[in-house]
Image (spheres, coloured by chain):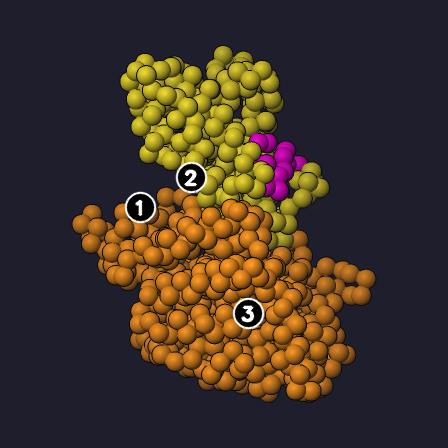
Chain colours: A orange, B yellow
Amino acid sequence: MSKEKIFRNLAVSGPQDLIFGFAPKPVKCGFDLTIGAGTVFPEVNFTLPVMDVSTKTWPEVIAHYEEMATNILKRAVAMKVPGIVLEFEQLPQMTETPEWGAEITALLERHLKQNYEKYGLRGAARITPADIRGPAGVKGVKPVMRHGELWEKLNRSFDLCIAAGGDLISIESIGAKEVHDEGLMFGDVRAIVFALGVLACRDMTWLWSQIVDKCEKSGHSVPAGDTACGFANTSMVLAYQKLLPDVVAAVDRAMAGVRTLKAVECGAKGPSKDCGYENPIVKAISGIPISQEGKSATCAHFSHVGNMSSTMCDLWSNESVQNIRLLSGNAPEAYTELLAYDVRLMNIANEKKQGKIFQSWMIESDQNVSAIGTILAPESVYTIAKAIVAEETDYLRTVAAGKAALDIIQKSVDKKNLNLGKKELQWLERLHKEFANLPKDENVLAEEIFGTMGHLFDPECYGLKVAAAAAK
Amino acid sequence: MTDLKKLHKAIVEGDAKTAVEVTKAALAEGAKPLDLIQNFMIPAMDEVGKLFEEEEYFVPELLLSGRAMRGAFDLIRPLMAAQGVQPTGRVVIGTVQGDLHDIGKNLVAAMLEGAGFEVTDLGADVAPEKFVEAVKAKNANIVAFSAMLTVTMPKMQTTIEALKAAGLRNQVKVMVGGAPISQAYCDQIGADAYSDTASGAAAIAREIVVNQKVSAQFAEKGEKTLAGIAAAGKGTK
């Protein structure tokens, strides 16, 4: 049963309250770790090198995770980090065989426990099963989200990983990706808004109500949060490759905040996941701590907001790095050291009461480089968050977030702070028009999108009734 | 008389409605299908590709042009089939087993369709045997794999092995791509071609079909291909 709590107000009184290390609602988890209470911790994410994952190679897979956990924690102790989070982002095979994901979860917990008992290293493991529902992206096949073998496996993966001691439970859920992808590819704003504001929010509510319920029953695991990785990160990466307009990606990011917030409205406590660059909006509204990635995640992907994304974080992540040999050791431990230095600077800045000064440099570094940077500055985040809570429904909140982002970008362009090219300006103008023409009633949009993209999604999988679908 | 420059313009501007209207009118007036393709549609898509390469077009503009081209081409296809003209080529595409990242693959598929290929998109997380089945069923010229994760890269080689085991390797070209893939990896696993961009992949696919063995196979059979016609028209073959 959904126990949704809709946020009507913000958790912060202004952008000045948004700062790294501090969240209005800190989270206790794992081995004596409290996140968001004044200290930023590194969150290290690691993966396998080029290799096959199968029954045959499973002992080798386990050996890699043993090595990575051992070396990361050894380096963390050497660097005297104040605490650490290990993220285990499962590969699809590890969720399809839920026992595999649970085995690695138990392995990480064992290492964290040993280091806590021996060295007093505070820590927690974030466990992130892969959202294998679907099947994803098969032409002519509508994804099945709420039943079937794939959902059963994912469901069981959550159960087994929680039973194996997973401290923080997360997922990068993909509900509505089939419509959002099509919207991005064709620059179809109405489809993007419908995907995020209607379908994705419905899927998040359905999924996260169950995850929260499982975690609460465990008495140990914390329902941490989701990320719009399959949505706004797709558009961000495409924008950086000049395949999509930056302004589309920026507006998409702002709107994704409403979708990611749904996990918290269903009971997630944070820290929300690292690759959700929309997380500051979620923090401003809900007060939960957030994980972020940026300049020290260049091993995983490119971004223009590597400093900006650290300005409000509570965990600081490297996104993902392979277990390959470097001169100083293997890459996961090298990135642990990198993150340790990053968080040490942030924590010292806060201890010296100069966190806002340090933050201002990081804001200025990225704010006017891209439209995404512009909308992720604390003042912009606060404005977007206010626009979201002022509206009633997820759909209207999504539209409001998009409009607020557009206004912020436009003002920055008008003031000549943000310099956009001719094509970007054409798209900005187009977006203004498209948003002005969106219907007030989401049902009108649902009927319209079903008419044009009904071949891509099944409304029933989102608990949505569409008259045109019923008539078929 | 219909102004066929409007067809070219409609495709470049991604205006499917106009592209279809102009094509309908032109065909009703007795325009030759091959003339429409060779002198208006393919040059229009070439211009779109150039605008994309020069970063004047984003993906949406590119795909809307592709949609306009397909709208017009759907009217012409039955007439072409009646004349025994084949599509540019047949491509089976998918993300390899264990990999759910599919937007790059989707872009490549769309670019290939825009270039006149018949594309069978198997989606994401595709098992080697599914690729084999589809290559057989579609009599594909090219099979294209995408991988976004380092741990799914080895499935490319597994899939190539499956094609070999099925006796299909010599009749199909293998193209690979995805963030962790490189030309070196392509060579290492015995694939035929690699591209790091969607538009590059379409260009390579066209090159494969026109200039290499597949084109020769078609020529031996006395069949015509759209790509062959276009290339011959430009004197590049």
Q: Residue A208: which quarter of the image?
A: bottom left
Mark 2 → mark 1, Cα distance in angstroms: 14 Å
Asked whether the beta carbons under mark 2 and mark 1 sit within 8 Å of each other, the answer is no
Residue B130 is covered by the magenta coloring: no
Q: Height in image: B196 above or below A464? A: above
Chain holding disc 2: B
Residue A465 screen position, x and y as percent = 23, 59
* Residue position marked by numbered label 2 in the rendering: B64
Q: Give the mark toward the camera: 3 or 1.
A: 3
Residue B194 is covered by the magenta coloring: yes
Amino acid bearing label 1? Thr
Nearest the viewer among B223 and B7 is B7
Relative horizontal placement of residue A377, taking residue A181 as reference (left or right): right
Mark 3 or mark 1: whose residue is earlier in sequence: 3
> Can residue A73 be seen in this snapshot?
no
* Residue position marked by numbered label 3 in the rendering: A377
Q: Which quarter of the figure is the C terminus of chain B placed in?
A: top right
Chain holding disc 3: A
Circle 3 residues within 10 Å: few <14, some 14–19, many ≥20: many
Circle 1 residues within 10 Å: few <14, some 14–19, many ≥20: few
Q: Give the mark toward the camera: 2 or 1.
A: 2
State the mark number for residue A452: 1
Relative horizontal placement of residue A230, taking residue B26 as reference (left or right): right
Q: Residue furthest front?
A: A415
Asked whether the beta carbons under mark 2 and mark 3 sit within 8 Å of each other, the answer is no
Circle 2 residues within 10 Å: few <14, some 14–19, many ≥20: many
**Magenta stretch?**
B190-204
Q: Secondary structure at mark 1?
A: helix
Residue A8 screen position, x and y as percent = 36, 79
Same chain? Circles 3 and 1: yes
Amino acid bearing label 2? Leu
